[in-house]
Amino acid sequence: MSFRRIIFWSHLATGCVAGLFVLLMSVTGILLMYEHHLPLAILDSVEVEAPEGATRMTVDELVQTEAVQAAGTNRVSLAIDNRENAPVILQAGRSDAVLLNPFTGTPIENPALSTEDFMHTMMGIHRWLGAEGEARSTARAVTGAANLAFLFLVISGLYLWFPKAMRWTFFKLNLFFRGSYPNAKARDYNWHHVFGFWALIPLFFIVISGVMISYPWASQLIYTAWGKDMPQRGGPPPSGGNGPDTAEAEETVIELMSLQAAVDAAIAEYDGDWKRMSISLPSEPDAETVSLTRDFGNRITPQQRTNLTFDRSAGEITQVREYAENSPALKTRMFLRFIHTGERYGVIGSTIAGLASLAACFLVWTGMALSWRRLVLPAWRRRKAKKA
């Protein structure tokens, strides 16, 4: 058996086994096309009418409100948009965002909530087949394997797309849709080749980044390629007692600047060149440093974001970290993460990713149809002829 036939039958078998899972991830990929763009567009339309004579609450006042207190202290942040009368966005971990009235601190209706809930549901199906709890690890293994299978289908499909003999007639017939077809088999064959060719590049990046998301070893390969070790989650361990002893610390009283002062310093640093300023609320009220994030682009991708550290005892910004300062390995990983959804290139990129997912649906459909005609239909016809 020739190498080409081995690749062909491997391609066909892999498509038959993984096709339904690839189809499911492709359909949900289409529905997730504007996963973050739609909620942001809805939130941008929300404005809060200011009561007569009212002024916006400070961050420190908002922290004392019932809504923020109920959010706890784990990964809680407040985000302020650079729009007049825009609501303040309260985020606690991965829970749904809560919109706060900037004048009263009370929660207001979030018109993007239903859209966000729908996207969360689609993401659960896309990544974990809708499984919950401990079943997610099994489902994640299935979708990860489907990603690997899809990567093989893309690479082997490119190899099989090119004919043994390079003739213009073949390219003319398989680069574009035909006006008419003699039968359904000819139509499926043409569509499989056309969709496969034009969606090849975006599908390759979508699938290879999907493998990176699915498997830690794939992320490790990125860092290894750059000669780096992948950072571990959770950060460094405690220092082990090199700081001042408790008695001395109790005698030292440090006057800390307010959280609002931190936000004001960050806003002043960029003189209006920002769209959203977020502050991570410290778990301890007497924390000497707070982290802030300045979003100045689409508020989605990290290359349009600046991380800042404000020292409350010194009353100044002590660290500014731009995207360009990240290591090449981390930037590569971030690039692949946001190329998976196309969000790396904004709405246009997300649209291309969605259309590539649509093309993948046609590839699965036409591939299954062609496999049916090659493997099942002839046997069924022979059996029927014997009975006759």
Image (cartoon, helix red, strand yellow):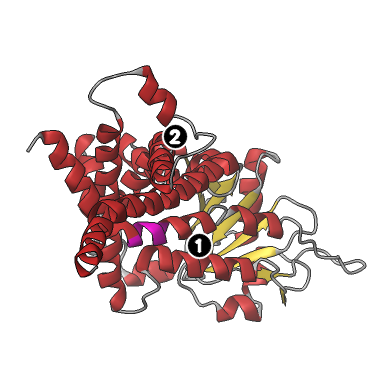
What residue appears at the point 57 percent right and 55 percent down from the top-left corner? Answer: 36
Numbered label attached to residue 254: 1
Mark 1 surroundings: few (<14), some (14-19) or many (≥20) residues within 10 A? few
Q: Which residues are magenta?
A: 20-25
What residue appears at the point 31 percent right and 73 percent down from the top-left corner? Answer: 136
Q: Which residue is mark 2?
A: 198
Q: Position of residue 59 (x, y in %)?
A: 65, 64
**What's the CA distance linking mark 1 and mark 2?**
63 Å
Q: Position of residue 302 (x, y in %)?
A: 48, 44
What secondary structure is marked by label 2? helix
Vertical relation: 370 (above or below) 254 = above
Mark 2 surroundings: few (<14), some (14-19) or many (≥20) residues within 10 A? some
What secondary structure is marked by label 1? loop
Whether residue 301 appears in this view of the structure is: no
Vertical relation: 177 (above or below) 288 = above
Give the amino acid at mark 2: Trp
Magenta: main secondary structure: helix
Pick the residue in front: 64 or 172: 172
Sequence-wise first label, 1 or 2:
2
Residue 8 is covered by the magenta coloring: no
